Image (spheres, grey):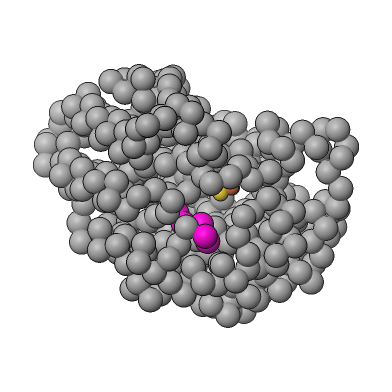
Amino acid sequence: MNKGEKHRAPRSIAIYVHIPFCLHKCGYCDFNSYALDTLLEKDHAGQDWAASYTDVVIQEIAGRCANLSLSGRPVESVFFGGGTPSLFPVEETARILDTIRRSFTPSASTEITLEANPGASDVERFAALREAGFNRLSIGVQSFDDETLRRLDRIHTGDDARAAFRSARQAGFSNVSLDLMFGIPFQSPEQAKTDIESALVLAPEHLSAYELTIEPGTHFGALHSRGELAGLPNEETALAMWEMRDRLLSEAGYERYEISNFARPGYCCRHNLNYWKRGEYLGIGAGAHSLIGDRRFWNHARPDVYAKEAKDPAAGEENITNKRKALGESLMLGLRLREGVSLREVSERCGTDPEEKYGELFFNLEKKGLLERSNGNIRLTHRGTLLANRILAEFL
Ligand code: SF4
């Protein structure tokens, strides 16, 4: 330890808690989530499945704190994601949050988010979550159009989504995010526009609006590979939807701070910002991933296997001591942000000069109008953002 390090305060971490249960599996979903009736009711017959899962999560928190010397670390953000965390009994959610509070050092300003789905979102539940300490909700709306929701296999309606938002406000949440999706089979550009406008009527503090991607291993993926998924927009229509989304949200005063994320001033999602800036995060729960120091590790995905291996639920681990790999990851994640990446900061953090490995790629992207530089920063241009998936893959 050198002199400077001696007095350095421990860095904050972000904590993610995965609640992998849903009422039903949506056709496009590649998240680690399980419909309750297909997995848990069989495996936990006669037991309180939520209390059992909570016990394992609490056991994991204690183990990680001890083994990774994380006890007492300041916490920038806590995020309960899924799955459908709003489906989980509030008393169990609160028990996990209390354990996090006692094990780490959150502050009054720590962002504490819970993902909610319309349909598992009444005022009483939200009020109890607020009481437990949550200060941000992220509601999975996807669309306000009932026919579009049905095509996505969602089990709520547009009115349920509006009701969930109103419940959040009534329960006292002043920081609410809505998730929308576009590029859905048979969705017209006008319908995609109506979805954005319907979200804007509610005036959330934050909006995520993603283009639907067809992932292998999902029901949609299987249909697509057999050529049976009809109605997907062509590239030109999808690009028009991207442009429309950016224009409408910008006109309404939302800043696009990441490729698919928009916020009113002061309401960017701090939890995800930490991830895109490649900060440290601890993932707790089935299938959760962590990055602590140079170590990346991930838990068993299936909740029953995760529970059996509760003492050490890691299913795999990677030591990222290769500076070039850390550099590629930092650029790939950081270029998702509107502010881009400071080459000096990345160079200091990764211990290697980005120009050495990627100078030629930067130059070529700049020449094509996909990347711009200013004051030692690089960032994607508007055109580069539209082609982000292809460009960012070059840093892997
Ligand atoms: S509600 Fe969300 S996590 Fe659950 S199956 Fe649908 S998309 Fe996946």
Q: Position of residue 161 (x, y in %)?
A: 56, 67
Q: Quadrant of the C terminus?
A: top right
Residue under the image location 43 percent in, 58 percent down: 269
Camera-side residue: 378 or 33?
33
The quadrant in which residue 347 appears is top left
Which residues are the magenta region?
Answer: 115-119
The quadrant in which residue 53 appears is top left
The quadrant in which residue 11 appears is top left
Residue under the image location 58 percent in, 80 percent down: 201
- Whether residue 248 is in magenta: the answer is no
Q: Quadrant of the N terminus?
A: top left
Residue under the image location 80 percent in, 67 percent down: 189
Q: Is residue 187 left or right of residue 304?
A: right
Q: Is residue 313 left or right of residue 109?
A: right
Q: Is residue 340 above or below residue 68?
A: below
Camera-side residue: 18 or 78?
18
Q: Is residue 42 above or below residue 169?
A: above
Question: What secondary structure do most residues of the magenta stretch adopt?
Answer: loop
The image shows a total of numbered marks equal to 0
Residue under the image location 43 percent in, 72 percent down: 167
